[in-house]
Amino acid sequence: MLSPLKDIEAEDRPRYNKELLDWEGKEAAYASAKKAFLDFSASPEAMLGAQPPAVPEMPAQPVPLKITVSDITSQKLVRSAAERPRGLLCHLDEMNSWIRKITDKQSGEDRSAWVVSYESERYEMDRVGAGSIHCENLAVSIYGNIQPQVFKQNLASLAADGLLQRFIPAILRGSKTRLGHPVPEYMTSAQAWENTLRLIYALPPQTYKLSPAAYDAYRDFQSWYEGAKQDERLLNASSEYMTAFGKLEGTAGRLILLMHLMECPFSPTVDVGIVERVVKLIRGYVIPAFRYALGELAGVLDDSFDQWMTDYIIQVSSEVQTVDLRSLKRSARRQLENKNEWQKDQMVLDAMYTLEKAGWVMQIEEKMTKHHVVWAINPSIATMFREHREKVIKAKQRHADYIYRYAYAQGKERKLVRGYDPETMDE
């Protein structure tokens, strides 16, 4: 995806080398003229009013073409952007170290510079050692990959000032992975992608406007958007999610510009079809992705045990009608390790209370002095989640078969996981 940008940077190297050599010649001429001027200023001729030698203007030093950056500090980022007003792309193959750097209060990293870079505006950074760095257009795009656990652990700190809400999350679904097949290069879209990047890079500054129909379509989206914001507030959506939701108008505008550049870069007006497709993308993907990444995850950072309990009830719902506190603690001994008895009881009771509110179980007996609590399982759970339950059981059995494959090769009896029926589930 990024290789064409690297090629463009490499192709610019001869230009930079030539301009650097020319600049070094001008620098030498400037240094020589400046020395002559200073020598003259200290001579008797200067006191008599003689004409001083001229000093040519010193041009700015040329810089190599830089489109992408990776491991970079905020101060270096602002300096690089000041020298390159076209903007930069920060590519982070693994975002963990970058997140650790900007969330550590002792690192000295200026997090506000990263946040402001989203707006593509003037920016000035003042430092005691480096002085003032004035950037006419601080424009930085960030693309990176992050592990789900790292995302969960740092979600609150990243969302505190709206930094995280400026990203569009691309959530991967494990069920969609499949065996890849080699494809000849001429059958891929690699060449079209490279041509698109090179064309957009070569464009002079452009000004685009929405066509009348596109403007009406965008206004319709804005009307829907205002009503949707009110609905989200009534539903008590998380603050992290609402902050991202509040930026959807700007996000839609950016995506409209992006698609127009890819499809019709020479047309001064944006077609209504592009606006309609972007609105469909916003409503069909971006909002659900925000709701999951910033809504559900933000509100359930510590619910791993609740999730385990939910899955466990689904699994046993076809075999038993009731569960009790002792059996639940015994089944969850790995999840409850390093907890005392009171903590174990409370964690199980809290998780089951959530399921009670959802109508999955109902408490029918309680004798807390003897640690005896019994719940009845809703019979409809077994039917409702039958397909999901079978998928989980089959996955567990495949895992067990892999673990004990060497034992089976020696003639040992096959170990079957709970609920697995070889006659109907063997694949």
Image: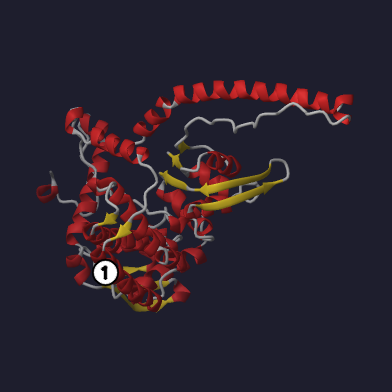
Residue 210 in view, yes or no: yes
> In this figure, what is the number of numbered marks?
1
Question: Percent from the top left, x then y, of residue 221?
Answer: 29, 69
Query: What residue did someone put label 1 on?
Result: 216
Amino acid carrying label 1: it is Asp
Question: Percent from the top left, x then y, of residue 94?
Answer: 44, 40
186 horizontally vs 351: left or right: left
Callout 1 crowding tier (Cα within 10 Å): few <14, some 14–19, many ≥20? some
Residue farthest along the left direction in this orientation: 423
On-image quarter of the C terminus: top left
The residue depicted at 40 percent of the width and 50 percent of the height is 148
Of residues 313 and 1, the one drawn nearer to the viewer in this rendering: 1
Of residues 328 and 393, the one drawn nearer to the viewer in this rendering: 393
Q: Quadrant of residue 191?
A: top left
Question: Percent from the top left, x then y, of residue 222?
Answer: 33, 70
The residue depicted at 43 percent of the width and 70 percent of the height is 350
